[in-house]
Image (cartoon, rainbow, N blue to C red):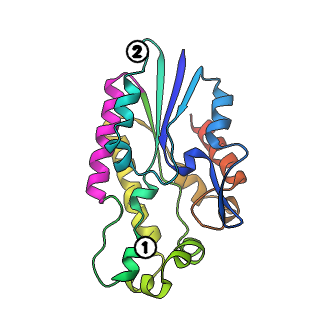
């Protein structure tokens, strides 16, 4: 038996942002990979808007491990952190000059990721970590943040530089890389593959966060080529 479990957020769920609404892609990267590798079972615990902090508070990994067949070849993929790095933009707009922290403080994110990886390794899983697909600051600011909060106030918080959104997320991505190195787990660098593609913007929805169908196909191809 070869089993795959995924712990992630909307991207590993296969969400796209289209015509101002959230939809499912025709085929997510997980759908493509599950077919390509012919896993006997695939459990996808990815949830739209999910943070690692929320996942751990809910005890999702612990509950899953109680169902595991230890004699099987079990693979666990962690594709999570983009929401942890995000902010409560409405709260920021109310007091933009104050010091706001992300939805999950980065020190907590790093600690929880290490705990999650060790739990899965100790349960006999081959763990695979994925770097965070990049957020494109201008699209995210113009098409999402400014629609839910006062853009001028948000720009005060960002010190007039919208690219601070990307750089802040990059810090969380470094924690993924460090966690993979410290625990000896496989790391698949989705972020580098996307950033290195000359048509990177063409693989994203207008929100600057979610891949479109072309993007999900690209992510699946990247994983297959790296595996």
Q: Which residue is mark 1?
A: 89
**Quadrant into which the C terminus falls:** top right
Residue 70 is tagged as: 2
Residue 220 is tagged as: none
Q: Earlier in the sequence, mark 2 or mark 1?
A: 2
- Secondary structure found at label 1: helix
Q: Is residue 13 above or below residue 4?
A: below
Camera sees residue 204: no
Residue located 64% across and 34% down the image: 33
Residue 208 location (% of width, % of height): 59, 66
Graded by Cα atoms within 10 Å as few (under 14), some (14 to 19) or many (20 or more), the crowding at tag 2 reads few
Residue 168 location (% of width, % of height): 39, 67
Left or right: where 49 falls relative to 142? left
Q: Is residue 167 above or below residue 180?
A: below
Residue 79 location (% of width, % of height): 48, 45
- Secondary structure found at label 2: loop
Residue 162 location (% of width, % of height): 48, 79
Task: Work out whether residue 185 or residue 5 is closer to the camera in this orientation and state it.
Answer: 5
Residues at discs 2 and 1 in contact (Cβ within 8 Å): no
The magenta span reads 105-125
Check residue 210 for magenta coloring.
no
| Residue 158 picture quarter | bottom left
Residue located 42% across and 86% down the image: 153
Check residue 107 for magenta coloring.
yes
Main SS of the magenta part reads helix
| Residue 62 picture quarter | top left
Considering every residue shown, the one lying at the far top of the view is: 71
Left or right: where 209 falls relative to 65? right
Residue located 61% across and 67% down the image: 207
Camera sees residue 61: yes
């Amino acid at each position: 038996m070869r089993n795959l479990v995924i712990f992630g957020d909307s991207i590993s769920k296969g969400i796209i942002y289209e015509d101002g609404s959230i939809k499912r892609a025709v085929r997510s990267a997980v759908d493509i990979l599950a077919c390509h590798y012919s896993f006997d079972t695939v459990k996808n615990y990815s949830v739209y808007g999910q943070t690692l902090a929320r996942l751990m508070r809910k005890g999702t990994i612990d509950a899953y491990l109680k169902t595991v067949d230890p004699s099987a070849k079990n693979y666990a993929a962690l594709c999570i952190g983009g929401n942890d790095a995000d902010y409560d933009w409405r709260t920021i707009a109310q007091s933009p000059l104050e010091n706001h922290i992300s939805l999950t403080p980065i020190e907590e994110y790093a600690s929880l990721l290490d705990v999650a990886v060790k739990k899965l390794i100790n349960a006999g899983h081959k763990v695979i970590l994925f770097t965070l697909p990049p957020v494109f600051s201008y699209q995210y600011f113009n098409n999402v943040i400014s629609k839910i909060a006062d853009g001028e106030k948000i720009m005060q918080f960002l010190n007039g530089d919208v690219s601070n959104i990307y750089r802040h997320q990059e810090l969380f991505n470094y924690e993924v890389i460090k966690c993979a190195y410290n625990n000896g787990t496989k790391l698949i660098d989705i972020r580098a593959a996307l950033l290195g593609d000359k048509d990177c913007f063409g693989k994203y929805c207008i929100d600057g966060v979610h891949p479109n169908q072309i993007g999900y196909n690209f992510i699946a191809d990247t994983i297959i080529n790296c595996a």
